Amino acid sequence: MAWIVQNLWLVPALPILAGGVIAVTKQRHRAVAASLAIGSMAISFLLALCAFAHVLLHGTEAKEVFNFPWLQFGTEWLKLGWILDPLTAVMIVMVTFVGLLIFIFSVGYMSDDKNFTRFFCFLALFAGAMLGVVIANSLLLLFMCWELVGLTSYLLIGFWFDKPSAAAAAKKAFIVTRIGDLGFFLGIAWLYFETHTLLFYDGGAGCLEHSALTTLVTHATIYGLTASTGIGLLIFCGAAGKSGQVPLHVWLPDAMEGPTPVSALIHAATMVAAGVFLIARIYPLMSANIASLPPLTPTVALQVVTWIGAITALFGALVAVAQYDIKRILAYSTVSQLGYMMMGLGVGGPSVGMFHLITHAFFKALLFLGAGSVIHGCSGEQDIRHMGGIRKFMPITFAAYTCGMLALCGFPLFAGFWSKDEILHSAFAWSISSIPFYMGAFGALLTAFYMTRQMCYVFIGTYRGHAHASHDQEAHSHHAHGHDPHESPLVMTAPLAILAVFAVLLGFLGTPAWPWFQSFLEGEHATFSFAGFAAANTVQLMLASSLIVFLGLFVGWSIYGRKPIESATAPDALAVAQPFAMSTLAHAFYIDALYGATILRLNAWFAILSDVADRFVWGGFVKAFSFFILGLAWLDNFFDKYVVNAGFDAGCDTVSLSGRSLSLLQRGRVQGYLRTIGVALIVIVILLLWGAKA
């Protein structure tokens, strides 16, 4: 076994160790904290490159695992382990590289925050937990790291805990994702019950290998569903919560209350991608079909994944159209893109969904960091209505942000163009329905539109900012450098430039002419040939996709760019034309309000009912029982005092009196004894004489 396989655990262990050391480091040692976090990620990145090179050089078909016994239950051993395969190799390189750039960016962005050291502690712990999810060969180990990701995301989202909205957002994220994780946990328990193992691959005995899958697809449950479908849907609940799928998406936009580097790390490249990665990891289970059906027939589980993904993609794009917070627009964009990834998994398999996950990680991290640079340059301002003309003050940020925006829109030749087109192409060929394709196409049109709207508000026209810095918590994380925007320092712009390069070029690893990425994940050898463009409908769909993007850009420019916004108080053009629609979209279809009026209110009523029952039913029963016990105690005390004690005391008094009476006969005086004997003799003599006369 290669040394990199045996030592793959070091990739997540190093950031976790760094986080532990930083946790006991004093706040004033800021440079030490940043150096430990960045250094650990840099070494993990180098190890990830070694792992990637090993997979690349030694064949992509092999799944090399390292399993070890952990706990024993009777005669059964519960095993854990890690795996190195193409999916793991790609993910650990992406997570460590993007994470490293975000760590470096954070040095400049959080430079004036009083809790700088604590921030890097949480970042390192989060990165380590996420890398643990990626390398796990055991669903149990994956779940443990999964929950650590949830904990550290709670700490990072609520990093500014003295800000009520941040504290509320952290609690919301934690609770909503736990709802999904409950289904995830039930799926794990069911899978272990059926297969007696939670190892993915174990020399033919793993839960994703042929023997276990055969057992799962032949075991029918309620409504004729197979055990594999039921387990897959339960695990998908956890993935839907973590990856912000409808209806468990509500936590993700609010999570923007955390520092912007947190948004880039958690909500672009890593945490929200964990759900997509999970479905890709258990894809053999999700796609397992009974022998009587054709091999390419989508399972019920994959159909659910596809429809939920399509709905989420369209929903996120619609809501992003009406947002004004620069980070919130990107948040709903992330929701939409995660929907595309899930749809890609459902209609095309892991290679399709994961390709968009990887490209999205780079250009969305670029967009979030670019938004952070804008916020930093505008002294904490996040409302795009109070920006404008930023390109003149921040040219590097503008250039990098433009690359990320074009990649997100799917502009031809940018990274997002290739990965999103592959999803649409697979959706077009989906045998169940063509509706997801049209939903995805309309979402692509909206993506180009709302990103053009954001660019026009932020970078075009004249600056509409306040005369003073924002009092938002994010403004307190750095100094206000004056009223006019200013370019960010090199430590922040350098990561933007690197990410911008990947946002432009990364997609060329998965073009129809050279589908290297897809071939790598599928264990095949990729060859370069322009014949790939001759596949059915490929060129037509690429042209249609490009026209959709151009149409979105044109409509956005026509409404917001042709006549630049002059004032921060000027009404939105769409809000004037369609006030009801824009209000509905601005409030995200009132889903949060619906949850508040139904689930949360029901929970509040149940809490009140529980309180009343506790006070007056269970509490009353407890009080009545306590009074009953007190009554028994009083009766016992009365019987003891007036019956037992009284009888005992009377007996004692009688014995004492008898003793005192008898003691009179034994006073120790001889004359008294003789007198008594004499009197007794006289009495006896009299009695004898009396008897003789008779």
Image (cartoon, grey):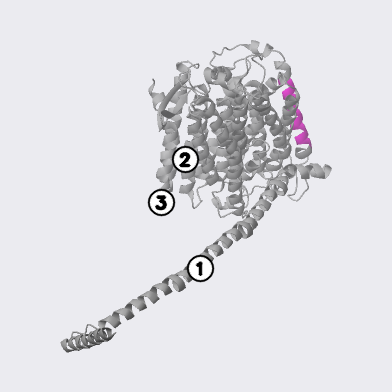
Give SS at disc 3: loop
Q: What residue is drawn where x is 56% and y is 14%?
A: 526
Say which of 663 and 462 sits in front.
Answer: 663
Which circle's residue, 2 or 3, is located before the other in the chain?
Answer: 3
Instruction: Please say if 489 is above or below 681.
Output: above
Q: Which residues are magenta?
A: 542-558
Instruction: Identify the residue position indicated by label 2 in the image.
Output: 124
Q: What residue is drawn where x is 45% and y is 24%?
A: 51
Q: Is residue 373 visible?
A: no
Tell me the CA gap for discs 2 and 3.
Answer: 16 Å
Q: What residue is drawn where x is 27% and y is 86%?
A: 693
Left/right of residue 156 with respect to residue 597 in the rendered view:
left
Q: Amino acid at mark 2?
A: Ala
Say which of 512 and 132 sits in front.
Answer: 132
**Could you say where residue 426 lies in the image, as x and y percent from the top left?**
68, 20
Q: Report which quarter residue 609 is drawn in.
A: bottom right
Marking on residue 585: none
Instruction: Identify the residue position indicated by label 1 in the image.
Output: 635
Q: What residue is drawn where x is 51% and y is 32%?
A: 95
Q: Amino acid at mark 3?
A: Lys
